[in-house]
């Protein structure tokens, strides 16, 4: 009787293990999920800036050899950004992506700034100037979970943007009579990423999903006089299994 009961218990345990294993195999998520997204949003200027030198910034300030130190809102106005990227979510948590990002740098029509070496205040005209950022955008984020399984997931991470800041001016140089040429400088920025993904729909096969994301970032570091922004945006993402 004892042996018979022991055999039943072992058989029941084996069935339980097989059942749990089968259920896990049906519900487990692949170690890799690919993601394509289109994003855009509103960008608010932050930070202080100084050391504006060189031909590009003389066009903005109209001063030769000046070295003003200003807050971002003295020079730049709120603007917009948009982009697209491809990435992968690994092991449900680790996400990395590479993409393109465009930012239209908004300039105030005029501003009052202090400058050195001669202390004082000067009124500066900035009409006829265009500034744009064209970046390759790298992101490394940590997700709380896989949105395909849980339906939603917050994330936090780090972004790095490297690209060209391009300045173009309309008209001609009053001294030489030559048309202004476009100028570009290689710039980079580091940003803190934070947001949340929410699943919208799933394919019948459950192998792909459309996701709406709150995609926000804060540029806490930038090279030279590159504008730093608090970016508030949305992204439409397509999750799919390869």
Image: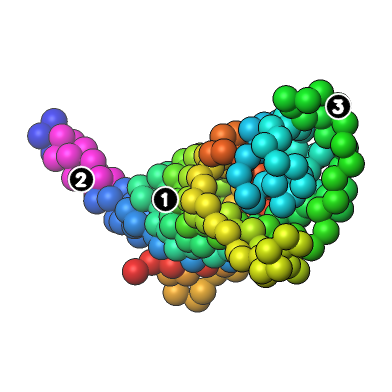
Q: Nearer the viewer, residue 37 or 119?
A: 119
On screen, 57 above or below 168?
Answer: above
Q: Percent position (x, y) of residue 143?
A: 49, 43
* Quarter that holds the C terminus: bottom left
Q: Foreground mark, 2 or 3?
A: 3
Tell whether 126 sits left or right of 213: right
Q: Which residue is mark 3?
A: 120
Q: Earlier in the sequence, mark 2 or mark 1?
A: 2
Residue 84 lies in magenta, yes or no? Answer: no
Residue depicted at 68% across the width and 58% down the height: 131
> In front: mark 1 or mark 3?
3
Task: Find numbered disc 3 in the image and state the secondary structure of the residue it sits on.
Answer: loop
Decide which of 11, 99 is in the foreground and name it.
99
Q: Quadrant of residue 10?
A: top left
* x and y, in percent, of residue 31 in the image: 32, 53
Q: How many C-alpha atoms fall within 10 Å of the one at disc 2: few (<14), some, or many (≥20)?
A: few
Q: Which residue is mark 1?
A: 96
| Mark 1 vs 3, N-terminal side | 1
The span shown in magenta is 5-17
Label 1–label 3 contact, CB within 8 A: no
Residue 43 in sight: no
Label 1, secondary structure: give it: strand
Would you name the residue on which mark 2 appears?
Answer: 14
Gap between marks 1 and 3 measured at Cα: 48 Å
């Amino acid at each position: 009787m004892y042996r018979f009961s022991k055999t039943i218990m072992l058989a029941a345990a084996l069935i339980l293990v097989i059942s749990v294993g089968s259920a896990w195999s049906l519900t487990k998520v692949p170690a890799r999920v690919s993601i394509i997204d289109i994003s855009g949003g509103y960008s608010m200027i932050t930070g202080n800036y100084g050391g504006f030198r060189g031909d590009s910034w003389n066009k903005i300030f109209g001063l030769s050899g000046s070295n003003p130190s200003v807050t971002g809102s003295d020079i730049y106005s709120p603007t917009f950004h948009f982009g697209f990227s491809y990435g992968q979510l690994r092991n449900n948590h680790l996400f990395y992506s590479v993409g393109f990002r465009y930012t239209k740098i908004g300039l105030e029509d005029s501003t009052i700034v202090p400058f050195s070496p001669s202390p004082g205040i000067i009124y500066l005209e900035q009409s006829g100037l265009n500034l744009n950022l064209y970046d390759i955008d790298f992101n490394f984020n940590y997700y709380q979970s896989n949105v395909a399984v849980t339906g939603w997931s917050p994330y936090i991470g780090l972004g790095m943007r490297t690209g060209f800041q391009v300045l173009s001016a309309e008209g001609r140089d009053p001294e030489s009579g030559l048309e202004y040429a476009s100028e570009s400088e290689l710039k980079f920025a580091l940003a803190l990423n934070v947001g949340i993904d929410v699943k919208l729909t799933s394919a019948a096969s459950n192998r792909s999903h459309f996701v709406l994301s709150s995609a926000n970032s804060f540029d806490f570091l930038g090279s030279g006089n590159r504008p730093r922004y608090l970016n508030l945006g949305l992204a439409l993402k397509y999750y799919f299994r390869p």
